[in-house]
Image (cartoon, coloured by chain):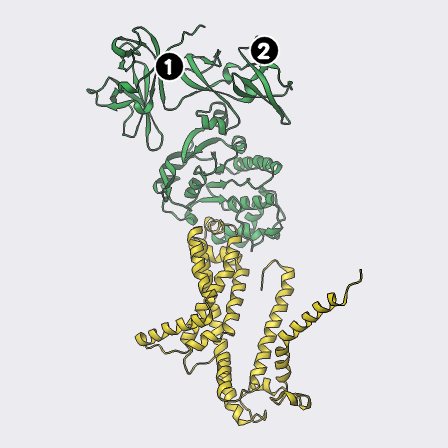
Chain colours: A green, B yellow
Amino acid sequence: MQKVLVDLKNICKSFGDTEVLHDFNLYIMENEFVTLLGPSGCGKTTLLRMIGGFDSPTSGDIYFDGKLINGVEPNKREINTVFQRYALFPHLNVFDNVAFGLKLKKMEKSQIKEEVEAALKLVKLEGFEDRKIDTLSGGQMQRIAMARAIVCKPKLLLLDEPLAALDLKLRQDMQYELKEMQKKLGITFIYVTHDQEEALTMSDTIVVMNEGRILQIGTPEMIYNEPKTRFVANFIGESNIVEGKMLKDYLVKFEGASFECVDNGFSKNEDVDVVIRPEDLEIIDAKDAKIKGVIDSKTFKGVHHEINIIVNDKEYTVHTTKDYPLGIEVGLTVSPENIQIMKKPGLNTFSGVMDYDGKVKISDNIVLDSESELEEGTAVVVRILTGDVLLDDIDESDFKGTIKDIKKRGIYSDVYVESENIIFVSSTSKVHHVGDEVGVWIKPEKVKLEVEEDEGD
Amino acid sequence: MKRSFSSWFLPILSTILSFFIIYIPVILIFVMSFTYTNSLSEIGADHLTLRWYASLFTNDYNSLEIASRYASNIDTLKDAILNTLLITTLSTAISTVFGTIFAIGINSFSKKIRSFLMMMNNIPVINPDIVTGFLLLLIFVLLETFTGLERGFITVLIAHIFFSIPYVVLSVLPRLKQIDPNTYEAARDLGCTRFSAVTKAIVPAIMTGIITGALFAFTMSIDDFVITMFVSGREFFNVSTWIDNSMRRSYIPKTVYAFNVIVFSIAFLALIISKFTKKQSKGELV
């Protein structure tokens, strides 16, 4: 069984008044290639510096190999770092740079020589021992920085955007080499980057971060194909994100047409975001299509054409290898497995039926008060913000439910309460526990109703 | 088009003239350090001699045919020369170490605090020596009343260290900004302690800046007159305060000329060597 190497528990970090990491939890297995991916300022480098020992968390614990290392000095950690601009020592030649760590370990001279030569061979810079640092190219400096770190045989290697300063071709070569090196050495890598392509190419696991929080953790395939939030979908490659409605399980409606999809577990008529990658949209003949649009602009991108199509005043981006003339009407289609459905954040959506006195019935025993004056028997869509779903003592409440799941969102949590097979999401800063029974209470003025349109098909 | 007479004549004339204005005193002192007499009009008829140079290194003035009115003066001059060399060496060494430490410290602060500290550092640099000297005198007088520390070697040394440190900081800081901001952390990462990361990674990387700073400190200290004058008390002299003192009450032995020529030659040589080595390495020696 694989062992947990790094365990970050409830890490918070503030610089003055700005909080850069909010209650961060993450564990990393041995031999894993983990990438922390996010825009600049998302806290990824700060996190790396804390693991390396150059910063300490404001609160929270860092475990390495089972031991708490919060106060351990960087030189006492079995961790080495490859810095963004390499931080090679300009007064030493290549050999002395690579041997720097070994000399501090008081290793035998002959053994140092052996180890340095092996490390230089690994990074394919044999024979560079006597070169001065300022005679090296960017790519060579990057390799020396790698060699200097791995020659110390750390259990964990931290890499802070090490390829950012290299040109495209070299960067692509190095991505492949880094992955190979990681496999060969069997060292755990934590790699920090804002480049989604790097992350997708090299990682075993990607941690997508923004504003000091984890948005999604998963394999590159999972992150790319099933982004959980609008941010992840946009950050990892291009996406068309449109509003839609789940008519029922495996059927979603957007742009006035219904499509089969592979997602379930939403309530009837729940508002959702629909994500379709540009390469997953297909252009077909307009007369066969459920969605029609006009080609507005196009750009040649080398491998593919990027075509922008206007559908109902909304722009869709399509990547295709075929070229189409501007201004013609085309149809769009997408296969079910390429439609990704995302829950809209912060909103509960249910379908219900009006009862007497503005009461709305959303299941046999769940009846909510509202301020509506709609006629009895009208089918409605019920929308309630997650912040307006209050959890309280059972006696005081509208109905009771069981807590199924709690997702931390930093200062507050999303609590998933199940009652008669309906899930209510409540955003609260109070502490709750999975499995508890709670009362659910919603103020009548917070219950928003909309007459349900008659869905023809 | 033919160039007019004034277009080439005036620049050449002004160049030659300014060159002479700068170097005539040097040349004059150089010539007179090899002659017996003090009088300019007798130079042509005079014999050349090395006895003023010899007088720097011997105590037997009779063999050098030096008049007794000079002899006692030469002895106090030698003390002054030794004082100058001792003060300069010590203040250069100490202010280089402290200035480097200050620069590393200043560099590690945030930009806002750093610019404030640099302003504080620059005030002694732009402050006129006469103000600095007077302020230091006030402090040392105060110190004397409380601790009984008399003005002399120690106060001059402290004053020289005080005015040299800002120059070291000024020449080390730009080098620190040039090196990779993660250099210290890289050394720590590879196993250095807090202290050895500074001595093994930072100091070698900023060595050219430190040497420049040391040269600054050296030149500031060796020719200082104004501040030394204020803080040296009545008994302690360096070369410049000694010359000032001698000029007022007695003759100046031409040993001073010899000493000046030696100092100038060393400085001139150092300049040429640094020019020569600069071509080979990227280092920025002054």
Residue A434: x and y, percent? 29, 24
A131 vs B104, nearest the viewer: B104
Q: Residue furthest right?
A: B1
Question: Which residue type does callout 2 highlight?
Answer: Ala
Badge 2 and badge 1 in a common chain? yes
Residue farthest along the left direction in this orientation: A395
Quickly name the residue at label 2. Answer: A286
> Could you tell me residue A25's position as x and y percent?
37, 34
Q: Measuring from the top left, give residue A380's x and y in whole percent.
A: 35, 11
Q: Nearer the viewer, residue B236 or B12?
A: B12
In the displayed structure image, the side of residue A428 where residue A142 appears, left or right: right
- Please say if A216 is above or below A274: below
For residue A373, side relative to residue A21 (left or right)? left
Q: Residue A176's quadrant in the figure?
A: top right
- Residue for point 20% across, 20% down: A396
The chain identifier of the residue carrying mark 1 reads: A
Residue that carries the numbered disc 1 in the rendered image: A267
| Number of on-image labels | 2
Q: Can the viewer see residue B267?
A: yes
The C terminus of chain A - image quarter: top left
* Residue A454 vertical placement versus A243 (above, below): above
| Separation of marks 2 and 1 at Cα, in angstroms | 32 Å
Q: Specify few, some or many for label 2: CA neighbours under 10 Å numbering under 14, 14-19, or 20 or more.
A: some
